[in-house]
Image: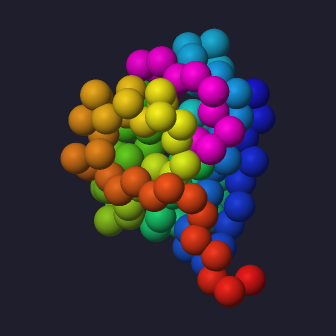
Amino acid sequence: MDTIFHLKDSTLVAELFGEIDHHVCDKIRDDIDKELELYRVDHLIFDFSKVTFMDSSGIGVVLGRYKKLKKSGGVVTIRGASRLVRQILDMSGIFTLMEYEEEEEHDGE
């Protein structure tokens, strides 16, 4: 699985694809951590709009990145999850820690 990154100012968007399970979580985690170290952002957005399935290992990836950014005063946002993925995230309590947005907001571009 590849993760596509978009950087704008101090915000990094991690666009995820396909199924997120224990088989791909190490790669996703490593890829995101490398980008966070490289750019030192203060806002990370997980874009789940192209994710078809996620299990509890995906929750671990999100929570781990949340803890990393929180240490430096940063924030994490979840974007565009399908109904099923959003239910999984909601059951984990993740939305008590971070915001959810339906889709990317366009700034008149």
Q: Nearer the viewer, residue 62 or 108?
A: 108
* Relative to 107, 40 lies left or right: left
Q: Main secondary structure of the magenta part?
A: strand
- Residue extending farthest front: 83
**Can residue 5 be seen in this snapshot?**
yes
Q: How is the image coloured?
A: rainbow
Location of residue 94 with respect to 4 vertically, above or below: above
Location of residue 59 with respect to 78 vertically, above or below: above
> What's the residue at 68%, 86% (across, down)?
108
> What's the residue at 47%, 27% (across, down)?
84
> What's the residue at 43%, 36% (across, down)?
86
Residue 5 lies in quadrant: bottom right
Q: Report the span colored magenta.
A: 48-58
Q: Nearer the viewer, residue 104 or 77?
A: 104
* Relative to 87, 41 lies left or right: right
- Where is residue 3 shown, x and y percent of the image? 72, 41
**Can residue 27 be seen in this snapshot?**
no
- Residue extending farthest bottom: 108
> What's the residue at 74%, 83% (across, down)?
109
- Residue extending farthest top: 23
Q: Nearer the viewer, residue 3 or 31?
A: 3
- In the picture, the quarter occupied by the N terminus is top right
- Where is residue 69 shown, x and y percent of the image? 40, 55
- Where is residue 82 shown, x and y percent of the image? 54, 37
32 part of magenta stretch? no
49 part of magenta stretch? yes
Location of residue 57 with respect to 97 vertically, above or below: above
Total marks placed: 0
Q: Nearer the viewer, residue 15 or 35?
A: 15
- Where is residue 60 shown, x and y percent of the image? 41, 28
